[in-house]
Amino acid sequence: GIISPVERLVTGSKLRSGDAIVGVASSGIHSNGISLVIKYAMDFSNKFLTRLPNGNTLGDEALIPTRSYVSLIETLIENDVDIHALLPGTGDGVGKIAFDKRPFTYRIRNWPEVPELFRFFHEQIGIAIEDCLKTFNWGVGYYIFLPQQEVERTVALGKSAGYELTVLGVVEEGERQVIFEPANIILNPPGE
């Protein structure tokens, strides 16, 4: 695509220690871990018609359309939010937060409500929380990294655009890893 003016280009090079990590709620699985869902569904007697605790079927939850984040990012850019980095929550789950090759630690202190499908795989099937965090988006489909002074405005703009944003944590200097405090787990970067 064409980005004009060039100042609107977000490459991730501005990512800094002290930046806030803001998560945008996913609409569901977004295909992260769909192979795992299919594998288990085929073992259930009712397959994809297996009921989850919320009353929906496994198939219903697996087929929730993936949310588009385009209008959110357009809103932020049009309002001159100083975005340091953007990251889709796909592939390698929550561990993907440590995408940048520089020595940053991503400290996650807060997390939004986890969708029913993911809770089912953890609580009912017994998939370990670490495996869930490395497989599923765990309820966050997009990450925005920005200066602390932009957080409040970003959350308000996101809400006005129809998205649920949660301040997840902060980027720190240190070993390249994700410290997921809600579960007291350290996640290695993608591919490690």
Image: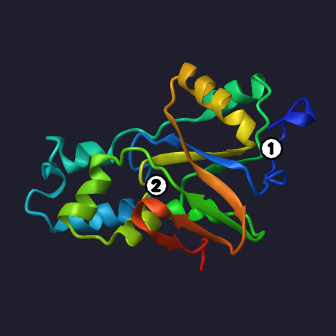
Disc assigned to residue 137 = 2
Q: Which residue is mark 1?
A: 10
Q: Quadrant of residue 183?
A: bottom left
Number of residue marks? 2
Task: Name the spot of residue 99 as percent of width and height, x first.
Answer: 67, 63
Which mark sits nearer the N-terminus, 1 or 2? 1
Q: In percent of the image, x 59 and y 52: which residue is there? A: 169
Task: Name the spot of residue 41 as percent of width and height, x first.
Answer: 21, 61
Disc 1 secondary structure class = loop
Q: Is residue 8 left or right of residue 31?
A: right
Task: Name the spot of residue 100 as percent of width and height, x first.
Answer: 73, 64
Q: In percent of the image, x 76 and y 29: which residue is there? A: 77
Disc 2 secondary structure class = loop
Q: In percent of the image, x 59 and y 30: which residue is there? A: 155
Where is the C terminus found, in terms of image quarters? bottom right
Q: In percent of the image, x 14 and y 47: which residue is there? A: 53
Q: Residue furthest left?
A: 45
Q: Is residue 91 above or below residue 85?
A: below
